Amino acid sequence: MDPRVSAGAALVGGLLAFFSPCVLPLVPVYLGYISGVAVGRTSSAAKRAVVTHALVFVLGFSVVFALLGAAVGLLGQALYTALPALTRLGGVVLVILGLQMAGVLRIPALYAEKRWEGRLGVGAGYFRSLLVGMIFAAGWTPCVGPVLTAILLLAMQTATAWRGALLLALFAAGLGIPFIVAGALLDVAMPRLKRIGRHAQVFSVVGGILLILMGFALVTGLLGELSFALNAAWFS
């Protein structure tokens, strides 16, 4: 598959995950928890603390996602001969997940989310921010999970550890950059994020439709044809 298609899908997937109904509304909560600073304080020291801890938090989940991508890439290498069949099966799974994400289906198991609910004291250290980021990656499954599954399928198709890690790092970038921007522009971003959060379900529906289309493309082989067409256009 054309690396540009996979890379773009990974980045967009991360953005969709950020704007999902179970991530976006809790961005202010996470910013407050990981920094030990109440969101809404406007001192320059408070803002620096929020941004710095946000960076460490993003680093935490980026490391976990990259390692996961590397593992899936190696799995794809080990199962290389079975990749076409696995890709089609994955496409069927993506269609089902897309229908669930769009609200057409309701699969109870996909709503059994595991969030970190701990409390951090004021002035919590960077290690805790890193740890919370890693827990975020490991346990926040219902809204991030369907999109993440799509990117993991693309990572498996690379059949290499470093390419799989790169795709998941791009997914983490799409998820993490808006988080860091929200921390840097705290006073401006929070009211806007709250307004956007009222329409978070729209992002879910859009994400679900994209997953259905990607699943259909994987099952029918259209994604591979698109990749070949892009390569031909690029090198012509």
Image (cartoon, helix red, strand yellow):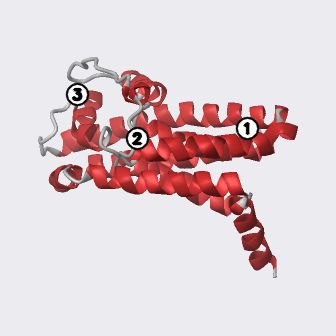
Disc 2 crowd, CA 10 A, few/some/many (<14, 14-19, 20+): few
Residue farthest right in this picture: 81
**Distance between the Cα atoms at labels 1 and 2?**
30 Å
Question: Is 95 drawn above or below residue 132 in the view shown?
Answer: below
Give how far across and how far down residue 199 sits, in percent. 23, 54
Q: Quadrant of the C terminus?
A: bottom right
Tag on residue 105? 2
Left or right of 42? Residue 90 is right
For marks 2 and 3, the one nearer the N-term is 3
Residue at the outermost bottom position: 236
- Disc 2 residue type (three-letter): Leu
* Picture coordinates of residue 47, whole percent (x, y): 22, 44
Of labels 1 and 2, the one closer to you: 2
User: Image quadrant of residue 165?
Assistant: top right
Using a 10 Å C-alpha cutoff, classify the residue at mark 1 as few (fewer than 14 neighbours), some (14 to 19) or many (20 or more): many
Q: Which residue is mark 3?
A: 36
Q: Is residue 36 above or below residue 90?
A: above
* Mark 1 lies on residue: 73
Q: Assign a secondary structure to mark 2.
A: loop
Give whichever of discs 1 and 3 has the lower sequence position: 3
- Which residue occupies 19% across, 39% down? 46
Q: Is residue 131 above or below residue 210?
A: above
The amino acid pointed to by label 3 is Gly
| Viewer-closest of 189 and 94 | 94
